[in-house]
Image (tube, rainbow, N blue to C red):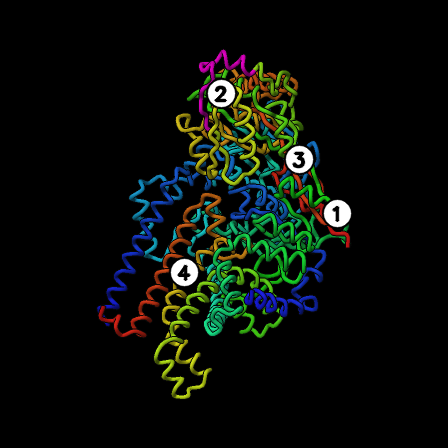
Amino acid sequence: MGITRRAVLHGAALSTLAPGMTWAFDRDSSRKILVFSGNQAVPVLDPHVRYDWSTRLIQQSVYDGLLKYVGTPPRIIPWLAEKWDSSPDGLTYTFNLVGNAKFHNGDAVDAEAVRYSFERGLKLNAGVAWMLKDFLKPENIVAVDARTVRFTLDKPFAPFVSYVPWWYIVNPKQVMANVSEGDYGRKWLTENAAGSGPFKLRRFDANTLIHMDAVADYWKGWPMGEANRLSGVIYRIVREAAPRRAGLQRREIDVITNMSPDDMSQLAKLPGIRNEDHAGFTTFGIKFNCQTGPTADVNLRKAIAYAFDYEALITIHNGGARLMDSPFPPDMESHIAVPDMPRKDLDKAKAFLARSKAPNGDLELEYVHVQGLEDARRIGLVLLDSLRPLNIKLNIVGQPWTTMVARGSKPDTAPNMTSVYVTPVGIDPDTIAYQYHRESWGLYYGMSHYENKEVWAMIAEARGMTDTQKRLALYAEIQRRIVADQPEVFGMIPNRTWAMRDYVKGFEFSPIRFTGEVDLYPMWIEA
Amino acid sequence: MLFYLLRRFALAGLMLFGLICLTFTIANIAPADPAVLAAGPDAGRSQIEQARREYGLDKPLPAQFLRYVSDLAHGEFGRSVASGRSVGRDLARYFPATLELCLLAMTIGLVFGISLGMLSALFKDRWLDHVTRIFAVSGIALPPFWFGLLLQLGFAVWLGWLPTSGRIGVSTEPGEPITGLLLVDAVLRGDGALFNQSLSYILLPALVLSLPCLASILRVNRSEMVEALRADYITAARAHGVSPWRLVTVHALKNALLPTLAIIGLRWGWMMSSTVLVETVFDWPGIGLYAVSSAIAGDFKPVMGVTLIVGLNFMLVNLVVDLLYGVLDPRLRDA
C-alpha cells in the first residue's frame, strides 16, 4: 500500500505540527462562544416569511416578541409587552410595552414598530401569516400611543394570544431603508436582521454557519449575570450525524441535536457529555385517506388501529417516546386521555375487519413516509407485520416531502396511509383541532381528508368561544369524537434530545419549541 | 483545423441544449409541489397559491421552460423556492470552494498517479507493482462516502490531528475573498495561520476525492509506460547511450502521457460530480453540498443549476482534451 503509507505520512507530517498551531483547537481562545450544531440550514431569516426549528433558533435569538413561551408545560410570559388585556367580547386586545427596549441600532422599540411588524406579517402573507390573517386586518392594528398597541379582531378568536409570541418585532426604520421594489424589505431581511433580541447577527451563511454576538446591554438583562454571559453563539450546520458527534467529542461543538436514539444512548456513556432528554410535543400519526379507497371505511380503519403494535413505537425510540392518548399532546390546554384509545387487540381488529367491506382482508395498502426518515420507515415495517394477521399486505414507499404533500393534497391521489409528524405551533387546543376541520383538507396535516360535519361545527364554534369552561368541555368532546372516527392511527410523541458538554449551563426546555430548537438566551458556559 | 474546431464547438452547443432540456424535464417530472416548499410548513391554501404565482409555477410547463432558457441566456439560473435567493449568486458563492477542493485533489491525483504509475512500470511484476495494483483497485472500488467517514474517525476523532468537517474554523473570519480559494487567498495575503488552517480542513476531503482519480491515472499511466518502454525507439535511445533518467522521463513518459490525458479529462469531470458525496460527508460548503441539501428539500432550481455547471464542466474539459489531442496528434486534425 505504497500510496496510502505515503499519503498518511504526508498528512501525519503536517498534522504533527497541529497542537502548537492556532487552528488545531481554534476555540480555546474563545471558550465563551457557544457552538450549537444541527443538520438543518437557515435559508430565510426573515421572521415574517419562514419558520422551522433551525430558523426559529436564530430568530428567537435576534428578535423579541411581545410575549414569550417558556417552561414545561409551556406558559406565556410578558416580554416586549409588560402587560396585556382583552375585552370581554374577545374582540379587542391591548398590549402595553416596556419602556426600555431598544433595537440593536439604538432605536426604541415603540408601538409603531409593533404595528408595522404585524402589518408586514399580514401583508406578506407567508410564514406566520396563516395564524392570524382570517381574524385580523392590518388597518385594525393601532398604535394608541408610544407604548400602547391595540388589536381589534374581526370576530372572536380565542387562540390569538397563543400565536403572538411567534410574531417577532422588526425595526421599521431599518426595514424601510432596505426596501426594494415594494417588497417590505423581504430580500434584505433574508440574510440580515433588524431586531432587538439578546443576540445580534455577525455573520450569516445560510448553508454553513451563523455567528451571533451577545448584546452587552440587552434591555432585558442577562439571567446568568453579566460576568457569565456568553460572548456569542455560533450555529454550525453539520449535515451528517457522525461528524456532529465527533465534533462534540472533540469539543469543537458544545451542543448537538438531531441524533438517533442509538447515538444518544452511546453518547450518554461518554465522560464530559450530558444528554438532555425531554417529553416532546410533536405527534406522530399514520393518516388514513378517509375519502377514497379501502380506508374510507371506518371499520377497516378501526381494524388497522387495533392490529397495530403500539409498543414497537416505544422500542424503536429506545424507550424515549410516549404513546398518544388523544389527538392532542399532553401539556396542551384541554387535553384529556380519551377512554378506549385503540391498543393492540387482535380479536377486536378481526371483529372490525369482519364488519368492513373487506371482511377477509385480502387487500394491498400503501404506506408513504418521508424519504430518509429512518424511524418512519421502521414504523412502516412494524405496520407491515401488524397487518399480516388481517391478511392485508403493505407497500412501504419513501417519497420526498414535497412529493408526499403534493399527493396528499387531493383525496384522489392521497395514499391509503401517510405517516406525518406534526408539531403544534401554540398551546391553544385549536392549533391541533383545526387540523381536523374541512378547511385543512389537502394541507400536510389534513391529508386524511377527515369528514364529520358535527365535529367541524364544534371546532369552528370552539375557536370563537370566550367562556373557558365551556370551551374546555367542547374540546373534550371533540377529542372523543375524533378518536371514534379514527382518521389516523394515533401513534406516539417522541422525546426531544440534545447532547452537550457538561460545562454548558442554563439549558431550559420548553416543548412548545420545535424539535431541535432551544432558547439560547439563558444558556452560558461555566469556564 | 478550423473545421475541426467548429465541429467541436457546435457539438458542445448541441449537448448543452440537450442537457438543459433533460434537467428541466427531470426536475418537473416529479409529482412534487415546489409551491408547498416556498410557502412554508403550516401555510394555508392562500399562501401556497401566492407562492405559486410568485415563482411563476402557475404557468404551463412550456412557458416555464422558455422562461428558464431565456433566464439562462441572461446568465440567470432562477430563484431557489426554499430561500428566494438567486441560484446564480449562490453558485458563485459556493463554486470556489468546490473548485479549490477539486484542484487540490487533481494535483494529488496527478503527482502521485503519474509518479507511482511510472514506478510500477519500471518495477513491473515486482512487489511495488503488486502493491500499487491492490491500492489502485481498492482506490476505485472504495465508496468515497465510507472512506471519508473512516478518515474522519481516524484522523479527527482518534488521533485528533485534523478537524472533522467544514472549510475553516468556526471562529475564523477569512475576510473578503480575493480568488475565493482560501489557500490561494492566504498565500496572496501572506497569512500563514490561515493557510495552515485551510490546509488542515481541506486535506481529508481532497484525499478522498483524489483517490479514484489517482488510482485510474496510476493504472493507465503504468500500462502506457510498459508499452512505451518496450518500443523500438527506447531500445534505440538506450543504444545511443541516453541516460536512464532521461530515457524514462523524457522519451517514454512523454509518449505515455497522451492516453493519460484523456483519463485526466474524464476524471476531472467525474471529480466535480463526486463532490456531491465528499462535500456532504465533510460539510464542505461547495456546489455539491448545495445540490444535496436542495435536492433533499425538493428545491429543484439549485439542483438544475449545479447539474448544468457539472455538465458544462464535463463538456469544457472534453473540448479542451479534444483540442489538445488535435495539437499533440496531427493525424486527428483531418479526421
Mark 2 chain: A
Q: Residue at x 65, y 20 (%)?
A: A337
Q: Which residues are magenta?
A: A349-366
Q: Nearer the viewer, mark 2 or mark 1?
A: 2
Q: Which residue is mark 1?
A: A505
Element at badge 3?
loop
- Furthest residue to the front? B125
Discs 3, 1 touching: Cβ within 8 Å: no
Name the amino acid type tagged 4: Gly
- Crowding at mark 4 (Cα within 10 Å: few <14, some 14-19, many 20+): many
Mark 1 chain: A
**Percent from the top left, x then y, of residue B57?**
37, 41
- Residue B269: which disc? 4
- Crowding at mark 3 (Cα within 10 Å: few <14, some 14-19, many 20+): some
- Residue A318: which disc? 3
Element at badge 4?
helix
Q: Which residue is mark 2?
A: A391
Q: CA distance from mark 3 to mark 2?
A: 29 Å
Compare residues B60 and A159 and report the one nearer the observer: B60
> Which of the two discs, 3 and 2, labels the residue nearer the N terminus?
3
**Percent from the top left, x then y, of residue A377?**
53, 35
Mark 4 chain: B
Q: Nearer the viewer, mark 4 or mark 2?
A: 2
